[in-house]
Image: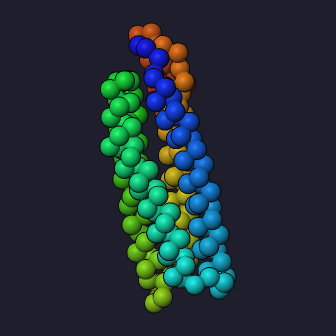
């Protein structure tokens, strides 16, 4: 198989950059939630920050599912199972974002602020696992030299397959 074109190589670099930015934004959002729980932040500002972050994350995943992943699947058919797993992760993230938004919408009323933190912690763990997996599998594929007929290391799920 030929080496991926420059556009796909650039995607690998951009993927890491976007993930770094999203991690930073999530950290800032977590700080906002902590400040709110300590009585320092207004829910409206917290909801606005969450909406901005949630929208950015959704756009990122929509772009992958609708643009980058189909192209990767065409160029690297061996990535099919990895891309399917990443799409399932995208749905889990979307579900978590929806729960988080619902919790934030209720902060002015009787909603439990600690539930916001728990959902945010759950989202953070899910995102980190997803990002690490995606970076390992996809960036490895894009950086790999031409493959022979055996599956490349980045497609092997555990050490027993190597």
| Picture layout, residue 120 above or below residue 67 | below
Expressed as whole percent of the image width and height from the top left, the position of residue 89 reads 41, 48
Outermost residue on the front side: it is 6
Q: How is the image coloured?
A: rainbow
Percent coordinates x, y for residue 25 in the rendering: 59, 60
Residue 160 in sight here: no
At x 41% / y 69%, what residue is drawn? 99
The quarter of the displayed image where residue 100 is located: bottom left
Q: Position of residue 157 (x, y in %)?
A: 48, 29
Asked whether the viewer can see residue 124, the reply is yes
* Residue beneath the point at 65% across and 69% down: 31
For the point 50% across and 53% down, which residue is it? 126
Residue 92 is situated, as x and y percent measured from the top left of the image, at: 39, 54
Left or right: where does residue 41 sit relative to residue 137? right
**Residue 150 is drawn in which quadrant?**
top left
**Image quarter hosting the N terminus:** top left
The tally of labels here is 0
């Amino acid at each position: 198989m030929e080496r991926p074109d420059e556009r796909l190589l650039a995607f690998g670099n951009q993927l890491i950059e976007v993930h770094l930015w999203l991690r930073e934004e999530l950290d800032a959002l977590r700080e906002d939630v902590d400040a709110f729980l300590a009585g320092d932040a207004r829910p409206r500002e917290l909801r606005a920050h969450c909406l901005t972050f949630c929208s950015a994350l959704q756009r990122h995943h929509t772009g992958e599912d609708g643009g980058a992943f189909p192209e990767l699947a065409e160029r690297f058919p061996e990535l099919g199972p990895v891309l399917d797993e990443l799409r399932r992760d995208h749905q889990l993230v979307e579900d978590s974002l929806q729960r988080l938004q619902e919790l934030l919408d209720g902060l002015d009323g009787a909603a439990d602020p600690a539930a916001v933190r728990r959902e945010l912690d759950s989202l953070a763990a899910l995102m980190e696992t997803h990002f690490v997996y995606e970076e390992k599998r996809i960036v490895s594929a894009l950086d790999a030299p031409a493959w022979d007929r055996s599956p490349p290391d980045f497609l092997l799920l555990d050490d027993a397959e190597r």
